[in-house]
């Protein structure tokens, strides 16, 4: 499991039905490619976030597959249409089997 992994998300607190809102996500993660060596010459095991998903009230909004070339601390910004009040659920999947989650509610104006 990667150390000090912290997902952060920014979602507006409210929106009118049918509005498109901007969502920003960032996860602190070293994204080790498996090609670097430590001070003793041992290969540092690969550990990357390989998938990111966002659902709204159980419906898929975004599903991204990532490869080893993705940068450290992956950041995503995207728009989503809000048809009703509900909850965005964000999930990041790590190569080592770890899953990191965050959720944010949004109300209607």
Image (spheres, rainbow, N blue to C red):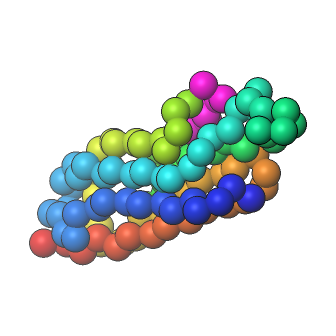
Answer yes or no: is residue 43 visible.
Answer: no
Q: Is residue 65 magenta?
A: yes
Q: Tell me which residue sits at (79%, 51%) in the image.
A: 96
Confirm whether the magenta stretch covers residue 41: no
* Quadrant hosting residue 57: bottom left
For the point 85% across and 33% down, which residue is it?
41
Q: Nearer the viewer, residue 37 or 85?
A: 37
Prevailing secondary structure of the magenta residues: loop
- Quadrant of the frame with the N terminus: bottom right
Task: Let me know if residue 1 appears in the view.
Answer: yes
Left/right placement of residue 10 relative to residue 94 reads left
Q: Quadrant of the C terminus?
A: bottom left
Q: Position of residue 80 (x, y in %)?
A: 32, 49
107 above or below 99? below
Q: Which residues are magenta?
A: 64-69
Vertical arrangement, residue 6 with respect to residue 76, above or below: below
Which of 35/97 is in front?
Answer: 35
Residue nearest the viewer, comparing 80 with 30: 30
State left or right for residue 30 relative to residue 85: right
Residue located at (76% from left, 27% from top)? 35
Q: In this image, 106 relative to 54: left or right?
A: left
Locate residue 13, reporting x and y percent: 22, 70
Q: Is residue 70 left or right of residue 67?
A: left
Q: Position of residue 58 (x, y in %)?
A: 52, 63
Residue 16 placement: quadrant: bottom left
């Amino acid at each position: 499991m990667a150390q000090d992994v912290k997902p952060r998300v920014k979602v507006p607190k409210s929106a009118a039905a049918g509005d498109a809102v901007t969502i920003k996500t960032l996860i602190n993660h070293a994204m080790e490619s498996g090609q670097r060596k430590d001070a003793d010459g041992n290969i540092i095991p690969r550990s990357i976030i390989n998938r990111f998903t966002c659902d709204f009230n159980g419906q898929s909004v975004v599903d991204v597959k990532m490869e080893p070339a993705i940068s450290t601390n992956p950041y995503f910004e995207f728009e989503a249409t809000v048809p009703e009040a509900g909850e965005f659920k964000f999930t990041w999947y790590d190569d080592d089997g770890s899953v990191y989650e965050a959720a944010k509610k949004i109300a209607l104006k």
